Image (cartoon, rainbow, N blue to C red):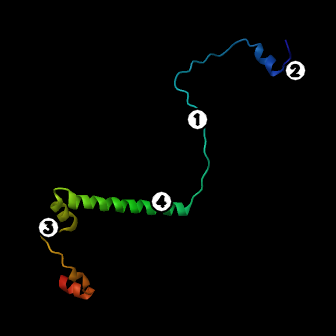
């Protein structure tokens, strides 16, 4: 037998008296990380916010046009959205008065 202090790693593991058998069941997942680290960019954030807001506005406008002009119940949608019925006439001159005149009309 070879003394422990002078034995190489190969000699230590070739003279094995017992072994341990492990039965493992399941799925073995191996994860490999890739990519690179990024940094915060205020300009990119502002650009994404502006783009998102413009797309929401565009979708709202397209939805209103479809609801008010293309669908058969456009009169109902107009009443719900604007509080107007189909025969109502819009008075644009009321918007040209001063704030004091408008408050007097409301009272």
Dot 1 lies on which element? loop
Q: Which mark is residue 48?
A: 4
The tag on residue 6 is 2
Closer to the chain start, of discs 1 and 2, is: 2
Residue 45 x, y percent position in the rendering: 51, 61
Residue pictured at 21% horizontal, 61% vertical: 69
Q: Mark 1 touching mark 3, by CB under 8 A?
A: no
Q: Nearer the viewer, mark 1 or mark 4?
A: 4
Spatial CA span between label 1 and label 3? 63 Å
Measured as percent of width and height from the top left, residue 58 is found at 35, 61
Q: Earlier in the sequence, mark 3 or mark 4?
A: 4
Q: Residue at x 18, y 79 (%)?
A: 91
From the image, which quarter does the C terminus lie in?
A: bottom left
Q: Is residue 12 above or below residue 30?
A: above
Quarter assignment of residue 8: top right
Q: Earlier in the sequence, mark 1 or mark 3?
A: 1
Q: Which element carries disc 4, helix, strand or loop?
A: helix
Report whether 57 appears left or right of 32: left
Q: CA distance from mark 1 to mark 4?
A: 31 Å
Q: Is residue 107 visible?
A: no
For disc 3, the marked residue is: 86
Q: CA distance from mark 3 to mark 2?
A: 102 Å
């Amino acid at each position: 037998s070879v003394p422990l202090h002078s034995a190489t790693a190969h000699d230590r593991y070739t003279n094995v008296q017992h072994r341990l058998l492990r039965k493992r069941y399941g799925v073995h997942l191996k994860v490999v990380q890739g990519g690179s680290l990024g940094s915060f960019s205020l300009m990119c954030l502002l650009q994404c916010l502006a783009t998102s807001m413009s797309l929401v506005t565009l979708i709202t406008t397209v939805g209103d046009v479809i609801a008010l002009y293309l669908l058969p119940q456009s009169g109902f949608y107009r009443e719900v959205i604007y509080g107007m019925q189909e025969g109502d006439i819009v008075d644009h001159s009321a918007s040209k008065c001063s704030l004091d005149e408008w408050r007097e009309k409301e009272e």
